[in-house]
Every structure is written in structure tokens, then in C-alpha cells.
Image (cartoon, helix red, strand yellow):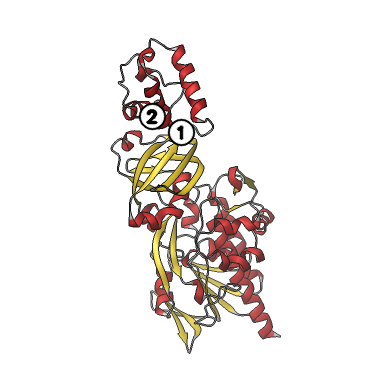
Amino acid sequence: MSRVLIVGAGAAGMYAAVWAARNGQEVCVFEKNEKAGKKLFITGKGRCNLTNACDVEDLFEAARSNPKFLYSSFYTHTNQDVIDFFEELGMKTKTERGGRVFPASDHSSDVIRTLEQEMKRLKVELRLNCRVEKICQENGTFTGVLLADGTMETGDACIVATGGMSYPSTGASGDGYRFAGEMGHAIIELKPSLVPIQTEEEWVPQLMGLSLRNVELKVLDGKRQLFCEMGEMLFTHYGVSGPLVISASADVGARLEQRKLKLSVDLKPALSEERLDQRILRDFQEQKNKQFKNSLGKLLPSKLIPVIVKLSEIPPEKKINEISREERGRLVYLIKHLEMTAVNLRGWNEAIITKGGVSVKEIDPGTMESRKIKNLYFVGEVLDLDAVTGGFNLQIAWSTAYAAASNLENKYTDRRE
């Protein structure tokens, strides 16, 4: 039996611990927080979107950094394997719109509890409030970890599962990048990803709290379209958020660092401009003597109406039967192209994941072992891997953790034989 030390008890760390222990290793997990899975707990607004039930090929489409690196790990341990893992341990799952998989209970705590109970059953040693200060090596081979209290813990292998820089409130402080850098690994520039977007229009804060469903969001750089999807978005005091916006941020973040971009929202994507015009005309005919500002209640959310009225430049008190075709045309265009100026992404406190990390060029894609330090592995968000929302980033955590734990089995089984 070999002794495996795991740094970090998040998704990747706990999953690696389970599989390493199942494969006959003695496992010790070091977690600097007072409990395991702090970031898992808040994932998916506390519901934990643990993977996506798409075809395996679609997992690569969702990856935004280094999808080819994930080929081996995704195919070796698929999204269905992850679902089966939790189901077999008694945690029922459900699949929602877009293939998003959640615990049937809607409680992220069930995911954490399932992992903790399996670790306990397998006699994994979990040390909470225990911070690793340094990872040690001799002649290019891992030897042990130095704890913050000065204790040295030796082991045969180490899996670094420290996560990224996102959600600092969960204890994320970039320890894994420091460990990797101290051992000569290249770190790709770290940036917040899957974050809300800040806009500059004065009317946006007036809509704070307004959620729009079934709208289409486009992000444009001049005439070039960088992003286009349908879904849900939310107005905030600083700009826009919600699933659509957060997904867009993964595609447009780098461009937004260079210059402002245009956000264009189609409030009625199911209707062509011609059909929308007919709809508005029909509504107007039913309320000919009303003022314009009181005529849009059937078409738009009440909070949005004053903003649309102002942007349309149609006088609010103008009677419906006095509105010209040209004015109606402006209204139609506005509803199909509600435009805002994106100025930047929000910061680490609101980022779901980290873009950048330990360069995958220095990691074996089949085993997650460092190409520089023998018996040292990196898994999950600490690597330069990220994907769009929808359970894909957690799938990266599960698959890379499994790859590392499985390699330990093969390596030490071979040694024993």
C-alpha cells in the first residue's frame, strides 16, 4: 500500500481521495478550511450543477481552454460515470434544461455528504483546518508536504486539488499556483471567468433585479458577432448577469480587456420584426385612446416599460392613435435590439471559475502527473482548464481527479507485482 497525500478537499480532492482509496491506497487529505467542499456548497446557487448529461463529444465543445488535453480523461471517466457514481451511493439525480444534472433534492450539501460518507467508509483521513505550506521534492521526485505548523508529512504521491482564485470567501487563495511555480511549472495568466458584465448606460441600474427569460443575447465587436445564445439574464446595479451573460463572459473576456463591446438583447426572439410590428399594431388598436406610456403592459415587464418608452423617443403622453409608422418602427427595432455597452468583467468575488493556471503542456493528459516532478499530480481548477456553465467545469474536476487516482492504482500495483 502506498501513502497518497491530497491537498484540498473540494470536488476534485474528495473525488480523487475516494478513487485512490478504492484502489487500495492509504489516503490523507489536507484542507485548510474548517469543512470540506466550501465552494461545492455554493455551486449552482446552492443546488450544485454536478455535470451535464450531453453526449461526451459535446463536453469538448463546452471546454474553452485546452479541450484536446481533456480527451483522455473525459473518455476514461465520462459524465455518465459521474452520474452513476453518485446514484450508486444513494444520491438521486435529475436532469434539467440544457442537460444540467442536479441532486434530486436540489441541495449541494447532498453531493458533499455523499463524498464525505464514502471517504469515511474507505477510511480516508481528512484533516480540516490544516494548511499545507510547501510541497517538497528531492531530485525531481515528490517526497512530502510541509504543514503550516512546521510538521513534515511524507508520502509516495501527492495530488494538488487546491482549486483556483474564484470565490475567495471559500478560502481560494491560489496556493496551488504557488506550489506549482516553486517547483518550476509555468503558470498561464490567471483571470476571473464566468462572471457578470459591467455596462455604462445610466438606465441599466433602474432595471436592477429584473430577470428576463427566453431572450437572445448577442455580443458584438463592431460588426463581428462574438456570442449569440438564447436563455435567461438579469439586470444588476452595475450591469448584467444571469446564465446567458456568464456564458458570454467566457467567450468575450479577452476582447473586452482590449476595448468596449456592444451587448444586443432581442426581447422577443420568437417574433420577426414584421410579426412584432403586427402584434404591437393589434395592441395599439385595442387601446387607441391610451397614452403611449400606458400601452405596453401586455408586451413587456412593467419595470422595463419606462426605459423602453424613454429609449424609443416617443413622447410618453402621446396618444396611441397619434403614433406614426416611423415611431412604431423605432419601437419594434428597440425591442429586437436593446443595446448596452459592455465595459469590463466583474472581479474574483463574483467569478465562478478561474481562467488560466498550471500549464497543461507540463502535465501528462492521461494521468495528470507532472512532467517535471515525479509522483506529483495536478487536478481540477488549478490547471489551465475551463469551460462554459452547465456542469462542465465540475466534470473537468471529476474526470481529472479520476485520471490521477487511477494512475496511482496502476503505478503501485505494478510496483507490488
**Type of the residue with mark 1:** Leu
Q: Between residues 67 and 347, which one lies in front from this camera angle? A: 67
Tag 1 and tag 2, C-beta contact below 8 Å: yes
**Type of the residue with mark 2:** Leu
Q: Marks 1/2: CA distance?
A: 11 Å
Q: What crowding class fits label 2: few (fewer than 14 Cα within 10 Å), some (14-19), or many (20 or more)?
A: some
Q: In this rendering, does residue 18 appear at all?
A: no
x, y percent for residue 397: 55, 62
Q: In the visual, does 256 lie left or right of 412?
A: left
x, y percent for residue 20: 61, 71
Q: What crowding class fits label 1: few (fewer than 14 Cα within 10 Å), some (14-19), or many (20 or more)?
A: many
Q: Quadrant of the C terminus?
A: bottom right
Q: Residue at x 60, y 52 (%)?
A: 52
Q: Between residues 346 and 145, which one lies in front from this camera angle? A: 346
On residue 304, which mark appears? 2
Where disc 2 sits, the SS reads loop
x, y percent for residue 398: 58, 62
Above-or-below relation of 302 to 401: above
On residue 267, which mark appears? 1
Q: Quadrant of the N terminus?
A: bottom right
